[in-house]
Image (cartoon, rainbow, N blue to C red):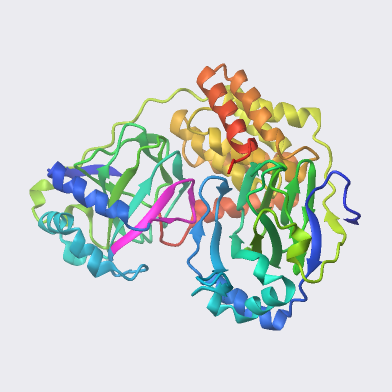
Amino acid sequence: MIAALPANLRARPAGGVALDPTRLAPELAVIDGFTMDPCVGYAVGPWRKSVVMARDERGALAPNALGAQLPYVAEQVQAAFYCERVALVQIFAAGPGAYVRPHVDWTAAEPIFTRLHVPLRTDERCFSSEDDTVYQMRAGEIWFVDGSRPHSAGCFSAITRLHLVVEGDPDVPPEALVRAHAPGSARIVERPPLRAEQLDAILALGALVTQANLMRIADLLGTVHFCRRVSCADLYDWLIEIARRAADAVLVRRCEELKRTYLAPFTR
Amino acid sequence: MPSCRIGSIAFDPRRLDADVETILSLTLHHCRDGVGDWMLRTLWGNEDPDGDGPEVRRRLGYLDRTLNETFAMEHANVVRVFAARGNGFIRPHRDAPQSQPAFTRLHLPLRTHARCFNSEDDVVYHMEVGEVWYLDGSRPHSGGCFSERMRVHLVIDFPPELAPHELFRDPARYRPEPPSAIERAPLLPRHLAALRGLARIADVINVMAIVDVLATVHFEKQADCAAVYDWLRDIAAETADSELVREAERITSTYLVLRPMGAA
């Protein structure tokens, strides 16, 4: 559903890049051939990233060896963003089934960077979420993602989702990074509510949970909010209750620690 | 022939440890059907995806010499390492049908501990350092490391025409023994109810996440490693979601019917 932005959604579209599919396609194929770095910690499945542009020794944004293979993408970055305010440009690649566990990056008072996403390749089974809202970024849209809110994203398609991720210093507001700032609408994903029997099925995993499978259960529960109307952060409370039902004090402590780790912000 | 221990090697612990550290200094690659930290690195052989096979082989001089002294390495196709830690595992699968084996595979644990398991059908077992194991890729099998400590197995693939007893230079070193099964708790009706209850939250979006939960069950409870796919199809049928039913069938076929050679 295309809708006005929900009042509680801090993520927002900040503009757009008019991508030319004909010129973009060969560079997407080049990106598919990159050996990219795994994302350690929050990512599940084939979630990878690579820096393609960074500030050089003179402080100017310049492509590195990977970025040099993407002249059209670099041209779009130059056209759409105030590059003197951009510190880093990365590619995030999410293969089939890849997603990031719901997490908080920082407090609103102390952001670590200002991050904008530009989907280069995506489809109807790629989602982003913040609290209890699931939304979709369309190719070419420029989106601000607020790392101070619980958020997640995933690719549940057969494609590899590719996002260009443009970062500025934390004191630069997102709109100040974008040359043609243009607020837009959002594609909000309607989801049915989580019914009582579904919550029962989740909590019944207390019969199966062990130290060996705890993170696999966490990774399953982290996907539920993409299909059901709950907050992405709810999984950590579910895990604590599952561990309590297993009557395993060590597991309970581990689940409480997981909640702190993923929902307490980093500090600078 | 089912997987079994077929011999032993008296490694020099100090020199083995040095070579393992060299292996762990290489870039290890997560593999497609691995879950969590289940990683693969081709060291040398007919495949050289990292483009450094000869150099890696030179750096692993102790291992290379020991393998050459023990096995008919001139016939080996490829030497790899499978490394795992932190609850990383490979989904239960078959590598090839029994009538068309893809390789004759040996596993040599180089670093392991008591929380490292392999499984085949309804047996879970442990391979120890210094043991030489034949692994039957035609049977449903899996492996995992349920500790933060790294498990490192050297894996050698020979042509499928070579039988395990033909791989040793000294035929007297071929001494097959069946694996000792690890005791597991029974799978009780309440466990089955919990896993079948996943039908209430199953969706094409989370079907692989469900597989990954189900796939861990057999390491700790008495179940066949391939049961994961029966449970998955039951769960999908319970949802009456035709797309999910098709996806469960596709996943089952991918892992149990025939799959390309790769990480196992």
Kindly report the secondary structure that dominates the magenta region of the rendered protein: strand
Identify whether A19 is placed above or below B79.
below
Residue A123 falls left or right of residue A240:
right
Residue B150 falls within the magenta-colored stretch? no
Residue at x 53% of width, y 53% of height: A39
Identify whether A240 is placed above or below A13.
above
Closest to the observer: B54 or A146? A146
Identify whether B123 is placed above or below A36.
above
Residue B258 falls left or right of residue B153:
right
Residue at x 23% of width, y 60% of height: B162
Q: Quadrant of the N terminus of chain A?
A: bottom right
| Residue A9: image location, x then y, percent | 82, 47
All told, the count of numbered labels is 0
In magenta, the rendered stretch is B28-43
Closest to the observer: A57 or B191? A57
Q: Residue furthest right?
A: A4
Closest to the observer: A128 or A69? A69
Residue A176: quadrant of the picture: bottom right
Residue B133 falls left or right of residue B38:
left
Q: Residue furthest bottom?
A: A22
Q: Quadrant of the C terminus of chain A?
A: top right
| Residue A64: image location, x then y, percent | 51, 73
Closest to the observer: A63 or B71? A63
